Image (spheres, rainbow, N blue to C red):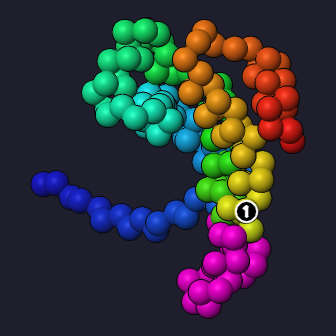
Amino acid sequence: MSSSTATTTTPVNPPKAGLFQSMALGGSAAAFAVNFTHPIETVKTRMQVSSLGIGATVSEILGKEGVASFWKGLPFAYGRELSYTSVKLGAYAPVRDMLGAGADAPFYLKFLAGAITGGTGSVIGNPFDVMKTLAQTNKEKALPLSELVGNMYKSQGI
């Protein structure tokens, strides 16, 4: 005879991630994803500054600059994701909770949490985004950061 003992388990709620842990998780997830989306964004950016279609743009990049050119500006994309996305995505839940915007909270508190984190992330991440776009549209050999920033400062200021 076999006897079976019924066991009951109670669900264990893992602790919520803190602000910095949440930001690190959000930023690292975005930095991982950008490895795959960056070539698509490079083609999109090149199409925006030229009159070429998608096929001609891909052919031009591949033929004149090589496969590695699809990843031009990738370090700046990492900087953008590790700053902008980590704040926008990672800090949202902790800021929302700090504001008391739980499930039953009014919409404006949740909106405020998103505005705070999204706005802060945009201010921090924008310089990386500008550098990324400049690197992606550069059809010459890749420029070092100091030269890229110097050229931008000369032509556009701060």
Q: Residue at x 50, y 35 (%)?
A: 49
- Where does the image place residue 35, in percent across and percent down from the top left? 49, 28
Looking at the image, is 76 positioned above or below residue 28?
above
Residue sitting at the far left: 1
- Foreground residue, 85 or 23? 85
Neighbourhood count class around disc 1 (C-alpha, 10 Å): few under 14, some 14–19, many 20 upward: some
Looking at the image, is 142 positioned above or below residue 156?
above
- Where does the image place residue 66, in percent across and percent down from the top left? 43, 8
Looking at the image, is 30 positioned above or below residue 32?
below
| Amino acid tagged 1 | Gly
Q: Is residue 92 visible?
A: yes
Q: Residue at x 80, y 38 (%)?
A: 156
Magenta-span inclusion, residue 94: yes
Magenta-span inclusion, residue 58: no
Looking at the image, is 106 positioned above or below residue 3?
below
- Foreground residue, 66 or 3? 66
Q: What is the secondary structure assignment of the residue under circle 1?
A: helix
**Quarter of the image with the N terminus in it:** bottom left
- Foreground residue, 15 or 75? 75
Q: Residue at x 61, y 56 (%)?
A: 89
Q: Is residue 41 visible?
A: no
Would you name the residue on which mark 1 appears?
119
The image quarter in which residue 101 lies = bottom right
Look at the image and give the residue range highlighted in magenta.
Answer: 93-115
